[in-house]
């Protein structure tokens, strides 16, 4: 259907240098990793290169999705919402489990947000965190302001 689509797979762990190279070439970055360190590294590279980040996560029966777009002055970055120094407890799906359909729901929504960004259709989830409680299929939304003191995208960042 789309013969001009090019998919390039890499079977290696992406360090900061590789992320810097890959993200510079991207139009939109879709992150579905399972740990804070990787999320923060991807976010930092997206901020550095001015690339929108569609972030999704799922654990147990809870899922979340947001768009962090450094091209918008009002948009927070991932570190504004989840600072690396905040001491969040790292929980992995392998340990805690995940309701399998939830991964598909969040992943499909990430694909929709990426396509909306690429085609400039509708309003992306920029500045909003959409959360799904999978036991009751209840959605909630939180507005996310940019943190001016954020060490990644705020005025406190080092030059």
Image (cartoon, rainbow, N blue to C red):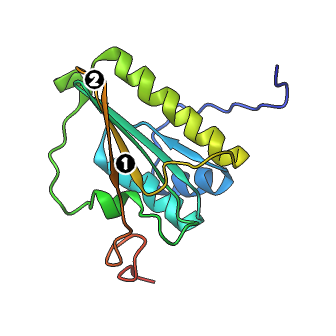
The foreground one among 22 and 92 is: 92
- Residue 48's x, y, as percent? 53, 67
Q: Give the Cα separation between the discs numbered 2 and 1.
A: 16 Å
Q: Is residue 55 above or below residue 158?
A: above
Q: Is residue 39 above or below residue 13?
A: below
Which quadrant of the figure has residue 127? bottom left
Residue 38 vs residue 11: left or right?
left
Residue 146 vs residue 124: left or right?
left
The foreground one among 53 and 128 is: 128
Quarter of the image containing the N terminus?
top right
- Residue 148's x, y, as percent? 36, 78
Mark number, residue 98 = none
Q: Which residue is mark 2?
A: 134
Residue 148 vs residue 120: left or right?
left
The foreground one among 113 and 32 is: 113
Residue in the picture at 50% in, 60% down = 45
Residue in the picture at 85% in, 25% down = 3
Which quadrant of the figure has residue 80? bottom left
- Residue 98's x, y, as percent? 26, 21
Q: Which residue is mark 1?
A: 129
């Amino acid at each position: 259907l789309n013969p001009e689509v090019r998919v390039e797979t890499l079977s290696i762990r992406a360090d900061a240098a590789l992320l810097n190279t890959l993200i510079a070439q991207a139009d939109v970055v879709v992150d579905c990793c399972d740990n804070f360190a990787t999320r923060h590294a991807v976010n930092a590279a997206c901020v550095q290169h001015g690339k929108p980040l569609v972030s999704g996560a799922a654990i147990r029966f809870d899922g979340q999705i947001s768009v962090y777009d450094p091209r918008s002055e009002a948009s927070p970055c991932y570190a504004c919402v989840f600072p690396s120094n905040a001491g969040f407890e790292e929980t992995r799906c392998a340990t805690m489990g995940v309701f399998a359909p939830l991964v598909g729901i969040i992943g499909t929504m990430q694909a929709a947000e990426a396509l909306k960004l690429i085609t400039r259709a509708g309003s992306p989830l920029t500045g909003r965190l959409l959360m799904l409680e999978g036991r009751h299929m209840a959605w909630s939304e939180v507005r996310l302001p940019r943190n001016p003191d954020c060490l990644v995208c705020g005025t406190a960042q080092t030059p």
